[in-house]
Image (tube, rainbow, N blue to C red):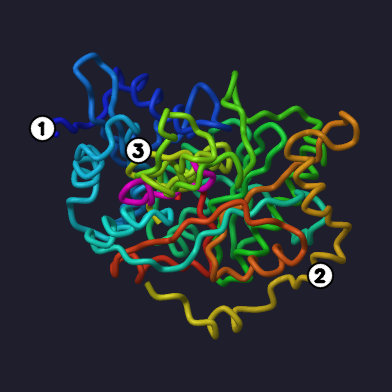
Amino acid sequence: MAEGMVRGAEEGDMPAVRAVARRFGLLRGWPAARDFLDAERAFGRLVLAPTANGRARGFGGTLRRGEVTHLGDLFVLPEHQSSGVGRALLAELLGGGGPKVTFASSDPRAMGLYIRYGLRPWCPLLYLTGPASGLPAPPVREARPEDVVELDARAGGGARPGTLAWYAATPGVTPYTTGEGYAFARVSGGDVVIGPAGGTTPQDCAEAALGALAATVRSTGPLGSNGASGSNGPSESAGDFGSGCAAGSTRAMGSAGASGSSGASASTGLEGSIGPVRSSCAGSTWARGSVGTLGSSGASRSTGPLGSSSGDIAPRATIRSAGAVPSTAAIRSAGAVPSTAEVRESATGQAGGGEPAPLVARIAVPGVHPLVSPLVEAGWRIGDLDTFMADDGALSLIRPDRYIPHPDLG
């Protein structure tokens, strides 16, 4: 690829960028009027590799949290892969200094590329899906985005007041707080996406996430009866959190399938990946998880060098000493938890002979977070996973045991 063929995306480039994003299924669940690409342009960097006829070969995007750069996207169309486009995009986005983090797919090409930029595997990022009701309901109250900026910065590695205010203004989004923890909840169709969320301790984060979910069910109704779609107009349909993605993440190297389809053979991770890097189930709320350089449309949103973007794990003693996180028994006793089959039926709207499907909750949880075991043991399923990757600078700032990222915004 010729030098100088990667540049910052301008307003006039957005149709071309979104065309690539749609090919990988990254816009599912986002309203037509605004999506994560707007946030990357406003609060980070969005770059593309344009063609002579006004289209795009691929694109990449980052968001900033204080000093930390979060690589959220790296997608190249299959017909332009192995041409240097992905590497040129990544060099433009990660060539500077400062701490860096991404969610990467399992594509070895993506992993190797990220490692060459100083990032190393830290822990898995699990895309969990389960029933929105029937869980413990710690008390929470609605909050303003500015009320939770400090909590978010301490757990997530840096302050991002602009990004939080932007997200809070998105239709269907409500921030909640317990005082020592916070969580954003977004209703989109029959899905509730929790994240970002964080807390002073792992327990504070867990309680805020569960409390926000319960508050959303109370305000929306267990079947989403208030009709909240989370959009001001038509939105991309939201697919299953962990399915419908080809297995790519970070979207950096994911592939949309040899023919550009987002079927099971293409992996894109949550955010489109270069391999199994960023699937395209996370944008939906689960369509974006990875950043694949090859641009695949998997279910998670990772960022590998080819499409995935995914250290030291927080000491277990720290997690244990933080306080009692709701146990599996407590979650089970809170109410009848539907089986995996029932959750699948709910997600597809096929339960109850055509009756409205219950709200389905989607949460991207780091593997070291104390919510993982009780949710999985209570019947939630792992729809997809990426690898949380970070360099030494980011590893010293981010606390994955007390932080639940948003799949598209980090």
The residue positioned 29% from the left and 57% from the top of the image is: 114
Amino acid type of the residue tagged 1 in the rendering: Ala
The residue positioned 52% from the left and 62% from the top of the image is: 403
Label 2 belongs to which residue? 330
Residue 128 occupies which quadrant of the picture?
bottom right
Give the answer, above or below, for where 155 lies relative to 56: below
Q: Is residue 327 magenta?
A: no
Res 2 label? 1
Going from the N terminus, do you reach mark 1 or mark 2 first?
1
Which residues lie in the magenta part? 298-308
Residue lying farthest top?
53
Q: Is residue 23 left or right of residue 253?
A: right
Q: Secondary structure at mark 2?
A: helix
The residue positioned 47% from the left and 53% from the top of the image is: 149
x, y percent for residue 59? 31, 34
Query: Callout 2: 10 Å neighbours few (<14), some, many (20+)?
Result: some
